């Protein structure tokens, strides 16, 4: 158990659906991240929030909309996705500004877009 | 821009033999370098990191990595492989002034043969 919880673990959605992924951490970290994992591709950094402010948006299409209401919770709102968006979506958190910086990952949400 | 290259999709090693998983990086400035491991149906777990100092870094489960600035490499090593080391290994890089932007490679699948 890493202290980072993602729900749901699996999600199947049609291209016209709207759904949300949820991530929660109780580690006291100030930064939270969304990564996309596709087979044989680099782990893709999507969004970063640091003290609830978005500090990174890695040219992610607008059909992905992040929300960070506080330092413990992170959401990824999905709408009108494409089949190529099917992937494992990983949430992570960290305490920045320290030499001990490292990411703690959740187990991910396996998303299938039909 | 930061980038990480892991040139091997898969590495096969016999149990008991030494293993090496390769990583090279491209970044402007002095990097923070990391290795993470992913077991099936799990998120990534931190193995080790290089921040500064001794070029040989020791981490979890008997793994170590050597930072080579002239070759911009950070190869992961272990003197004697175990079957339980079989997993997906990711190399990552960040900069000290942006430790909330951690960029990963595509991963190398390590297969230890009994």
Image: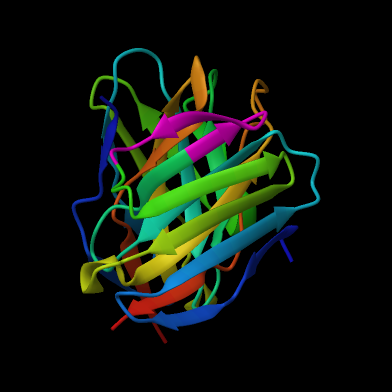
Residue in the picture at 40% in, 41% down: B92
Secondary structure, magenta segment, majority class: strand
Q: Is residue A34 visible?
A: yes
Relative image position of residue B36 (x, y in whole percent): 49, 52
| Quadrant housing residue B27 | top left
Image side of residue B97 versus residue A17, left or right: right
Q: Which quadrant is the C terminus of chain B positioned in?
A: bottom left
Above or below: residue B106 compared with residue B25: below
Q: Is residue A103 visible?
A: no
Relative image position of residue A34 (x, y in whole percent): 49, 50
Which residue ends up furthest to the bottom in the rendered image? B114
Of A48 and A14, the residue lying toward us = A14
Residue A51 part of the magenta-drawn span = yes
- Which residues make up the magenta segment? A48-59
| Quadrant housing residue A75 | bottom right
Of B65 and B10, the residue lying toward us = B10
Relative image position of residue B3 (x, y in whole percent): 26, 34
Q: Which quadrant is the N terminus of chain B positioned in?
A: top left
Residue in the picture at 23% in, 74% down: A83
Residue in the picture at 49% in, 58% down: A77
Above or below: residue B25 compared with residue B64: above
Of A53 and A31, the residue lying toward us = A53
Residue B91 part of the magenta-drawn span = no
């Amino acid at each position: 158990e890493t202290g980072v919880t993602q729900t749901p673990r699996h999600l199947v959605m049609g291209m016209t659906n709207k759904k949300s992924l949820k991530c929660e951490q109780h580690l006291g970290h100030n930064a939270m991240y969304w990564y996309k994992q596709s087979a044989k591709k680099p782990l893709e950094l999507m969004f970063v929030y640091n003290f609830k402010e978005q500090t990174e948006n890695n040219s992610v299409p607008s059909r992905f909309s992040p929300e960070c209401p506080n330092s413990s919770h992170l959401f990824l709102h999905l709408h009108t996705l494409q089949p190529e968006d099917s992937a494992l979506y990983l949430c992570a958190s960290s305490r920045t500004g320290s030499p001990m910086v490292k990411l703690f990952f959740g187990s991910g949400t396996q998303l299938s877009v039909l | 821009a930061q980038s990480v290259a892991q040139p091997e999709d898969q590495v096969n090693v016999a149990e008991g033999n030494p293993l090496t998983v390769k990583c090279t990086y491209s970044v402007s400035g002095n990097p923070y370098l990391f290795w993470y491991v992913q077991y099936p149906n799990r998120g990534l777990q931190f193995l080790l990191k290089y921040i500064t100092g001794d070029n040989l870094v020791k981490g979890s489960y008997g793994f170590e990595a050597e930072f080579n600035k002239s070759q911009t490499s950070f190869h992961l090593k272990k003197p004697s492989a175990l079957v339980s080391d079989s997993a997906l290994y990711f190399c990552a890089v960040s900069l000290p002034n942006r430790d909330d932007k951690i960029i990963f490679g595509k991963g190398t699948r390590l297969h230890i043969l009994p």
